[in-house]
Amino acid sequence: MDTSSAVQTPLEPSPNLDLSGSIIVKEKPYRELIGSLMYATMFTRPDICVAVNLFSQFQTNATEIQWKGLKRILRYLQGTPKLGIWFKGNSNYPLVLYVDADFANNPGRKSISGFVIEMFGDPVLWATRKQNSVALSSTEAEFVSLATGVAELLWLKQLLKDLGVPVTEPIPVFEDNQPCIHALESWETKRLKHVDVKYNFVKDLHRSKIINVKYIPTGEQKADIFTKGLPFELFKKHRINIGMCELST
C-alpha cells in the first residue's frame, strides 16, 4: 500500500464515490482498515471522523475508488503523526454542545449529523452519523442533529451528576441554522409536523431552560468538521477549535 505522499485533509470537499468499478472487498483488507481507523477516530483522532464514517458505508460494495479514499486517510495520518487532543480545562462551562448537519449531500440523499460535546472546554464526545430518514429541508436535518446531540448531552449531564460535578443550566448548545432556532421560540409547527417527536424533545428542553440553543456563524461552527469534507484552511481552523494540536513525545 503506497501511503508515501502526505495530504492536508483526510477527505476531499467533494469526494468521488463512483461505484461502477469492480468490488474489491474480498481482494483487499477494506473492512479491517475501517475497523482500525474507527478505533483511532473514537479515542484520539476526531479529525478523521467524517472521512471514516463516509467510507464505512461501503464495506460490502467498495471499489478501487473507495479504497483510494481510505488510503488518503492513511496518507493524512502519516503526515500528522503528532496531532492529538490536549486537555487544558480552560473553561468554566462543565458542558457545551456544538451541533451541525450537512443536508442531503450523501448518497441516498440522507443528511449527515455531526456534533462535539466539550467538558470544561475540551472535547470528550464527538460523532458523525448518517440520519435514518431523508430530511425534507435543512431545518429538519438540523433538528434531527440537535435531537441526536442533545440526547448524548443529557447522558453526560447525568454522568457528571452521579460523580458529584455540578452542571450549570441552561447548558449552551450552538447551532448555525437560524430557522431551526427560531422554530424553538415560536409555536409554528406546520413545516415540522413530520418530525414531531424530535422537534418537541428539543423544544421542551429549550423552553424549560435545561439547554439554551444559541446561534453561531457557520464559519465558527466547530461541528462543521464532523459533517463533510472541508477546504484545508477551514478544516485546519476547526481542527484547532476542537482542541487538536501537535503533542510533544
Image (cartoon, rainbow, N blue to C red):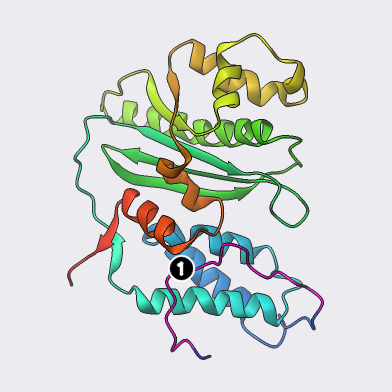
Which residue is the site of mark 1?
9
Magenta run includes residue 158: no
Image point (55%, 64%), residue name: 52
Viewer-proximal residue among 125 and 54: 54
Image point (54%, 79%), residue name: 71
Viewer-proximal residue among 217 and 159: 217
Magenta run includes residue 14: yes
Residue 171 at x, y percent in the picture: 38, 24
Is residue 36 visible from the viewing direction of this image?
A: yes
Residue 115 at x, y percent in the picture: 49, 43
Q: How many labels does the image show?
A: 1
Residue 243 at x, y percent in the picture: 30, 51
Is residue 46 visible from the viewing direction of this image?
A: no
Q: Residues within 10 Å of mark 1 (few under 14, many from 20)?
A: many
Choose top left, top right, bottom left or bottom right for residue 92. top left
In the structure shown, which secondary structural element does the residue marked by tag 1 occupy?
loop
Q: In this view, does 190 lie above or below 20?
A: above
Q: Is residue 244 left or right of residue 43?
A: left
Q: Is residue 143 above or below residue 234?
A: above
Q: Main secondary structure of the magenta part?
A: loop
Image point (22%, 65%), residue name: 247
Q: In this view, does 14 lie above or below 3?
A: above
Choose top left, top right, bottom left or bottom right for residue 181. top right
Q: Could you tell me the amino acid type at mark 1?
A: Thr
**Part of the protein shown in magenta:** 3-20
Q: In this view, does 105 lie to the left or right of 208?
A: right
Image point (17%, 69%), residue name: 248
Residue 24 at x, y percent in the picture: 73, 83
